[in-house]
Amino acid sequence: MNDFPNILSPILRMNYPNESVNFQKGEFILTWENEDYTVTGGLYLNWTPSIHIDFKGQFETNSRKIDFKTFGSSIAIEIKNEELNFYSKGVLKKIRIENNEIECLLPAPVSIGNINEPVEYIRFELANQEQRVGNLIQTSENSASKNRLELKDNEYKIIIDQYAENQNYNNVEVINSLARLK
């Protein structure tokens, strides 16, 4: 069984389809009406109703609050985190004064880090994949599955492993299914 490559384990676990993904957490500086606010929060990838990025966070308890009465006067914000080399403009979506929460929509593209720096590889997750049959990979110490797609040319190699905790079949069932297809 050790002759096969190991499955790429997921970066994150999703509890249900189209769940929002918090891909960056930290302390951010939110600028609204020329005032800076310290907000602890995160950047969220949302799948529905269309793919977009939100910032959700909570003001520090001792910081100034965005005045609810003037909330409607301007919804334009800027948000940054120097440690992440992150900056974006956006719009306010919600403010919950009772628990110091804020939500903002960030227009695409949203970039973190130096976009001009070369990278060795890119790791990403694909949600809601259909079942398929591909190359054999080891999914645990005692099991394997035929669910790897490998696409490559002279410059790039793309490996897609289907990882599903709810797969109710074992390798023997996959091999028997393939035999019936021939």
Image (cartoon, helix red, strand yellow):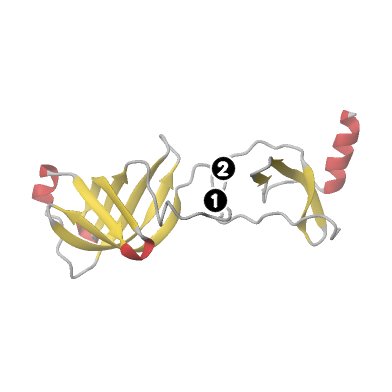
The amino acid pointed to by label 1 is Met
Quarter of the image for residue 98 reads bottom left
Residue 18: percent from the left, percent from the top?
A: 49, 42
Compute the Cα span from label 1 to label 2: 9 Å
Name the residue located 19 percent from the left edge and 56 percent from the top edge: 31
Name the residue located 67 percent from the left edge and 49 percent from the top edge: 163
Quarter of the picture containing the N terminus is bottom right
Residue 77: percent from the left, percent from the top?
A: 21, 49
Quarter of the image for residue 53 reads top left
The amino acid pointed to by label 2 is Ala
User: Would you say 25 lies left or right of 16 here?
Assistant: left
Q: Which mark is residue 14?
A: 1
Whether residues under marks 1 and 2 lie with C-beta atoms below 8 angstroms apart, the answer is yes
> As rendered, which of 92 and 81 lies closer to the eye?
81
Q: Which residue lies furthest to the top in this view?
A: 182
- Which residue position is annotated with label 2? 127
> As rendered, which of 3 and 129 lies closer to the eye?
3
Name the residue located 83 percent from the left edge and 47 percent from the top edge: 171
